[in-house]
Amino acid sequence: MHGNFNETTRINVNLGKEYNIQDIKNIAEEVFGTKDIMYQNIEKYNEKISIIVNKVSDEQIQTLTDKLKETYELESTDDLITTYVVGNYRGRDIIKPYIMPLIITTIIVVAYIAIKYIKLGLIKTICTLLLRLIIAEILYLSLIAITRLSIGLWTMPVSLLIYIVVTLVTTIQYQNELEKINAEEDNK
Amino acid sequence: MKKNTLLKVLIILVILAICLISFVGVFTKNKNSMVSVLPDYILSMNLNDSREVSLKVSEDTNTVTYDAEGNVTQDGLDEEGNLKEGYTTQEEKVNKDESLTQENYQLSKGIMEKRLENMGATDYTVRQEPYAGKITVKLPNSTDADDFIANLAYKGKFEIIDSETNEVLINNAQVKESKAVYSTGTYGTAVYLSIEFNKEGKQKLEEITTKYVSSSDEEGNDTTKKVSIKLDDEQLLETYFDEVNKTGTMQLSIGSQSTDSEKISGYIKQATLLASLITNKPMELKYEIENDVVYTSVIEDNQVAGIIICTLVFVCIGIIYLIAKFKIKGCLAVISYIGYIGVLLLSVRFTNVIISPDGIIGFIVALITNFVFINYILKKISSEDKTIKQIMKEAFVKCAWVVLPLLIISICFTFMNWTAISSLGMVMFWGIVSLVITNILFTRTLLDE
């Protein structure tokens, strides 16, 4: 749930007195019938809490209000709950900040590899690295699609991890091959 | 032999001290509480406090006055404050119904994103509820957040108008770029809002600066024609021009000349905020702030905890592998490896690196790289009859070629104007620096026979 970039509803609860997280969790899980709920503190005092759920109905909000009123013996429920929908974070918006840095670094890394490992074949080294990067990222995206994992906070960082690890592994392999070729040439 | 053992013990003690400082911390007593001497980790908005503002399309209405011919007029009241004869008033929505389209919602979102970028925000998310056009902006809860948020609700309508006739002479469509500039002179630094116009705007500016100049009639009465510079219908200033402007760039002074750096940075900030509004197209819709809430920690953040636990599990597996395969040398290498983690965490703290989820990935990359390096050295030691000095030298030469792409990635990412990416770059950079330092100081000494 945390870092989920889908459309969610924020229910901000202002109790005016210190809340107990376990009470809030029990009430929320009972009202919304799911455990897929995120809780976030509002400000520094433990008097306001934000409950984040995927979808809510007016009846559920009313039930939540009633249960909170009963549990915390509240006299008024006028400003108790504020709700608003947070729209989804579009895939292209998530990817956008990463495009330029990845293009720049890939061009420089490919240029470095092409120069350093030219003995292994210019086209071969460049194509192998690029193909590996593309295939690894496609596999990762396919995995997300197959397992129906929601696009979230960790989607792009993990994608970057794959990008870096593939680059590192490929460079190690090229370095080993180059050392082998150099050793063979020295032996001759 | 004795000297070598003593050195090893000393290195182990140093590593132990570094680990204690890094993992536990250093605390001093301050007013009956223990305060950490070390700088805290700086976390990005996704891992720490964030400010979330929801902006809704305004439902306000304006009273519009029409003259007898049905034209909109500003001057509809007579001397007694009553509506002039034949004039009518009508309550009109600020956002007309026909403007409430998906296209305009999307446009507003895009403009807000561009404004944030122009204002120098490096970490934010802008999300839109598709049906009502409501926009939610999430920002780090920093001192700049107030200014950023205040600027989002503006329509950003920039106009230079004739002060008398209200004729629009120049608007956003003629603006090419706007930015804050400053120049330092004898009396201090002056800050300007520089507005560069496009070809059409340049031509218009030349016409305006020719026409709107200081003048007086034969009797000496002031007949100067003036222009008003307005932003969202609010007058920024009323002025005339001393000379013809053929450059196509207009500079408006912000504040007065000063030598006070705090004042100057305040003026620059003010000019930057105005520039972000003027540079971009005005929004078709008027937005207003509906909610503005500071969210603190996420309660029971399982994902972050999960990633950290997974990383620790893999580190433990790596440690067990090194000890099982290389026995005593493996143990010593593990001590160096733990020292590396301590040094990396300390360097990240002292260099004020912002840690984002991408930064955590940077830690994982650093841990993998150092593991590969240490494993390579241990393999070489067990298979080749060379001194540790020779092995380390060879390993560093090989490592340099292999790690160079990582260094390129880390440096490129570090200079990117997006917190998540720069965080990854900085953590990786310090990971590489720590790798070199700890392996020269710790690993080489500990594995030396």
Image (cartoon, coloured by chain):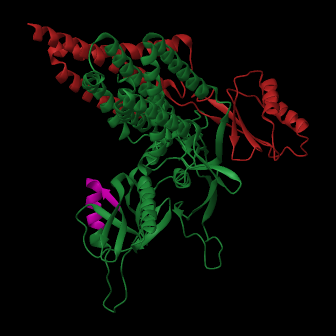
Chain colours: A red, B green
Q: Residue at x 70, y 47 (%)?
A: A44
Front position in the image: B327 or B242? B327
Q: Quadrant of residue A96?
A: top left
Q: Which region of the structure is painted magenta?
A: B194-208
Report the residue that reaches farthest toward the left. Answer: A188
In front of the other: B184 or B391: B391
Is residue B391 shown left or right of residue B351?
A: left
Q: Does the magenta segment cover residue B310?
A: no
Where residue B365 sits in the image (x, y, percent)?
42, 25
User: In the image, B45: left or right of B110?
Assistant: right
Where is residue B146 drawn, in percent x and y? Answer: 56, 54
* Residue extending farthest bottom: B219
Residue placed most toward the observer, B235 or B426 = B426
Q: Nearer the viewer, residue A182 or B288?
A: A182
Residue A59 visible in the displayed image: no
Residue, x 76% and y 28% (percent of image)? A57
The main secondary structure of the magenta stretch is helix
Q: Is residue A23 left or right of residue A175?
A: right
Q: Kindly identify the residue that appears in the image at 34 percent across and 29 percent down.
A: A102
Q: Is residue A25 above or below residue B241?
A: above
State yes or no: residue B195 in magenta.
yes
Q: Residue B292: percent from the left, percent from the top?
A: 64, 48
Question: Residue at 38% of width from left, 17% of height from top?
Answer: B375
Q: Position of residue B285 (x, y in %)?
A: 53, 47
Query: Is A155 placed left or right of B176 in the picture?
Result: right
Residue B291 in view here = yes
